[in-house]
Amino acid sequence: MRKILLFTITLLSLFFSCSSDEEDFPHFDGEWNMKSYVAFMPSVPVLETNDVIWDFDTPNKILTVHNTVEAEYPYLLKTGNYDYKFEGGQIAIKRNTDFTYYNFDLSEKNLTLDSNTDPNISNDGPVIRFERIE
């Protein structure tokens, strides 16, 4: 009986100590100025400071986009609010009903999002670079 109880306690401890795929990345929080958007396309956008601002609200998992060049570059996220989540070491941003997944590289002042997440598919999806707004 004692072995069963010990086994059950050990099993429950392991179950509750495992982390979920959902992680918090509070260092995403704040405003980010889009510096570049590169993909396999005929011409890439020429972006000036404050043309496209992404504002991550990490506690509420809401991304607010301010896009002043959406008429010129309709493939960039339009001005509005988007849900997002962290899953499996990636960030997923909800566009319409589907999530778009990005690998990310984050430092104190720079953020790079890379949509080329599947090594079995060609690497021609967008790579987006941001600089933190102080």
Image (cartoon, rainbow, N blue to C red):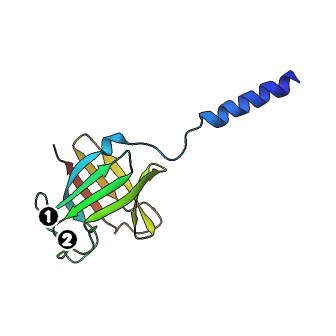
Looking at the rendered structure, the secondary structure element under dot 2 is loop
Q: Quadrant of residue 119?
A: bottom left
Q: Is residue 116 above or below residue 57?
A: below
Q: Residue furthest right?
A: 1
Q: Is residue 19 above or below residue 87?
A: above
Q: Residue furthest top?
A: 2
Residue under the image location 72 percent in, 33 percent down: 11
Amino acid type for the residue under numbered disc 2: Val
Residue 116, position as x, y percentages in the image: 38, 62
Q: Label 1 is placed on what type of residue?
A: Leu
Q: Position of residue 76 (x, y in %)?
A: 26, 69
* SS state under label 1: loop
Whether 12 is drawn above or below 62: the answer is above
In front here: 53 or 35?
Answer: 53
- Residue 44: numbered disc: 2
> Which quadrant of the figure contains the N terminus?
top right
Quadrant assignment for the C terminus: top left
Q: CA distance from mark 1 to mark 2?
A: 9 Å
2 with respect to 55 (left or right):
right
Q: Quadrant of residue 125?
A: bottom left
- Residue identifier under label 1: 47
Looking at the rendered structure, which numbered label has been put on residue 39?
A: none
